[in-house]
Amino acid sequence: MIYPGFISRTALIASIVSLLYSAEPVAGQSPPSIHSCFPAGCQIGQTVEVTVSGDHLQSQVSLKCSLPDVETVALGGSRFRLTIPPDAPVGHCDIQAVSKDGISVPWTFLIGNRDELTEVEPNDAITQSQSIPLNSVINGRIDKANNVDRFMFTASAGQRVVIECHAERIDSTLRAVLEVLDTEGRRLAVNRGYFATDPLIDFQVPADGSYIISLSDLTGSENERHVYRLAVDCGPRVAFAVPCVVQRGTTSRVRLYGWNLNSNVEDNEKNGMESIEIELPASLTGPTRHLSTRLLSTQPVITAHSFAYHYPGSHAPVLIGTTDIPVTQDDFSNHSVNSAQELTVPCEVSGQLVTGDEQDWYAFTAHRGEVIHIEAFGHRLQSPVDLQISIVEASGSSSPRELATFGDEVRNLGGVFRTDHTDPVGRFVCPEDGRYLIVIRNVTGGVSTDSRRIYRLCVRREEPDVQVIAVPHESPGAAINVRHNGRFLLDLIAIRRRGLDSSIRVTASHLPPGIDFPDVWFGPGVCRTVGVISADRNAAVLSDELQLETLSDATPGVSRSVLGGAVTSPVTPYPRGRMLSRLQMAVAGEATVRITADAHQPVDHHIYGMLSPKHSPGGIVDVAVQIDRQDMTHESPVKLIGVGLPNSIRNQTVTIPPGRSLGYLSFYLPPNLPVGNYSFGIKATTTAPNADKSPQSVTIFSNPVTIEVNPPALLLTIDPFADTEVKRGEIIQLPYHVRRLNGFIGKMHTELASAGVITNVPGLRGRGVTSTGQADRASIQVEVNRDAPLGEQQFLRLFAVGVVEDEVVYHGSQFVRMEITD
């Protein structure tokens, strides 16, 4: 299985999803949301009236299409007219609802080239089957419990009728089951999932006559979102291509596999599929902004390096990958260790594992210490395989020794926007000069044969690369809606490839006036951070594309476009996310609360004056958070927490009491944190007055906080036996150890401190200590005032400065655990 099982979509789950989609970021300002669109597609060159269901679609709502030449006209209520130009690309595009309060999450709309029909009820019984012609698409909906839609077509013996249902691929909640029956109700064929969970039946007509198509939901549930498009077709339908990847800038020969391909060649060993060879001109292999095929959250690398090819006469495009290195095909005789196919590194291989126990063997030559990165694509091609790769020694033995094995990529970097997959990715360091073997197999092959089991094998040296995806951080199902004087948070996910461990910068281009996106950084080895879009008070109300790109020191002079993603169905445990052709944002409404974070505020030292923060491993980052309210008379506590922090930095929380507009949140940088640039944000939860002045909970985000982490010069450690519970009026000694690092041997001065304060900590008096030479142990005397605040002393720390020629050059800190009692 390449896709997890589906859960039942009951009315309860539907209502929960509805609440998620309609979450209000600010009181009284609710952007529109789309739950379904019917019909879910249209024929090129035609006009269609669609009804969009969802939330906040009552008035002044327009539709926006990712294809700019598609005209949309609001007809009132939730009805719209779409006009598709005759030269529009066949396949998927996105529509979004736009209102004065924002923009919706993208919804899939399918553009076809067959006649379009609409399901007509009643058609549940065989005798009520709706008559339809071949080469047509029926738009329907399963909106009643245990509903079955039936259609009748007439065909001749020997005709090949491809019956295909689009549901999951158009953001529908329908778990479709297709059946073909004769007029007596006898089942002739059935399918519950061919392209992931969407079914397809290749029906070879046994005799002249009429046949019944039965379409139902696997769970028998009802839902207005159970929308489908049923294609009943005798025309060409391409399922996949071999090779599935071609070299950019070159003309390539590709064999297409599918049905009704105007080919005289039919290979029964390939599941009865037909194939035809075509030539792909080099002009098709360049970058493209619009991909007319559906791509999932597991496929950002595919999205960035692919194009959709439309075979003349077919009604669905096929995805073909592109690469910058030579491509070869497996030669179909490389199924044993003694017949390994020779490869020249770097290269990509396009292959098939047709039989269940098939293994493909390859050989390459490398030098000792050479790093080879190996990556296979199967799951991410939506191929029905679970691949495994082994590297073995080329000893000439029939049972060579295995040197490395690579399996599933189980890390999910994106939360509900899932990036984990079952494709193997690995790094191999050659132990010696010589020849090595690669064997690739499908661990779920079974006993059946299936020509759809294609794969792509990439064998390269350590050439760093990265692909970044931007996904809205709000509740799953949120779109990018920025309020005037407000901010919106994006989760940025970095798919690091081939040894890229350095910092990565994300920057914006072509921003509209009044919109800001400060540069942010992934720290070394970090795969997730946040980006922040801000709109000032005077920014225009607009809907526009957000264009981001990445830069890395490991790939100087090379930038990569940041791809957009969205969670279209946040139902757990199997949320559905997909890639977007464009990252659309809207500016609308007004924020009632705004917070500003600053990790670079100077702090006053009673000996050395104003000190600018210096960040290094073994130190503390103090973030000052300023709160600005539209209604300054409203007082409410503000809860703060970090967001987008690297996994190695422990998160912290703090609550700012009502009536205060400034607070601090502090984070300890662990000693093993790699040096480099890091970005994160602050999340605040508080209340703001609603239209009727009643308090409503709101969540807001700060501007990005970016710090430069430099090599440390000193590392403080508190004595583990130091007193942690002290009483008012008590005097204690706080022993500590300091380790000088990176050649620092100068003077060091240590004080008691807290966030934003050195020495003058409320309720406490600390006597600073100066250490010279090689002294590495000392103790600070701490006097607890009789009016000291009771309880845990949050963010209390020892703060040390390293001095060179009476100038402060280095900082180091360590939190002190202290609880004050009566």
Image (cartoon, grey):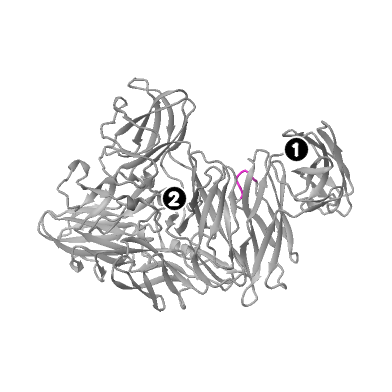
Q: Quadrant of residue 45?
A: bottom left
For badge 2, the amino acid type reads Pro
Q: In which quarter of the view is residue 78 placed? A: bottom left
Secondary-structure class at tag 1:
strand
- On the image, numbered disc 2 is attached to which residue? 300
Q: Amino acid at mark 1?
A: Leu
**Left or right: residue 183 compared with residue 808:** left
As helix, strand or loop, the secondary structure at mark 2 comes to helix
| Magenta-colored stretch includes residue 647 | yes
Q: Is residue 286 above or below residue 626?
A: above
Q: Tell me if 447 is positioned left or right of 599 in this view.
A: left
Question: In this view, which residue lies farthest toward the bottom?
Answer: 76
Q: Residues within 10 Å of mark 1 (few under 14, many from 20)?
A: many
Identify the residue at image location x=17%, y=59%.
185
Q: Which residue is nearer to you in this view: 575 or 751?
A: 751
Instruction: Give the left or right position of residue 318, taking residue 664 as reference.
Output: left
Examine the rendered structure and indicate whether residue 346 appears above or below residue 52. above
Ranked by sequence position, the earlier of labels 1 and 2 is 2
Q: Which residue is mark 1?
A: 714
Residue 447 in the image, given as x and y percentages of width and height: 26, 37
Which region is colored magenta? Answer: 645-649
Q: Is 402 positioned to the left or the right of 696 in the image?
A: left
Image position, residue 29 (x, y; %): 55, 72
Say whether residue 594 is visible: yes
Instruction: Give the image location of residue 419, x and y in percent.
Output: 46, 48
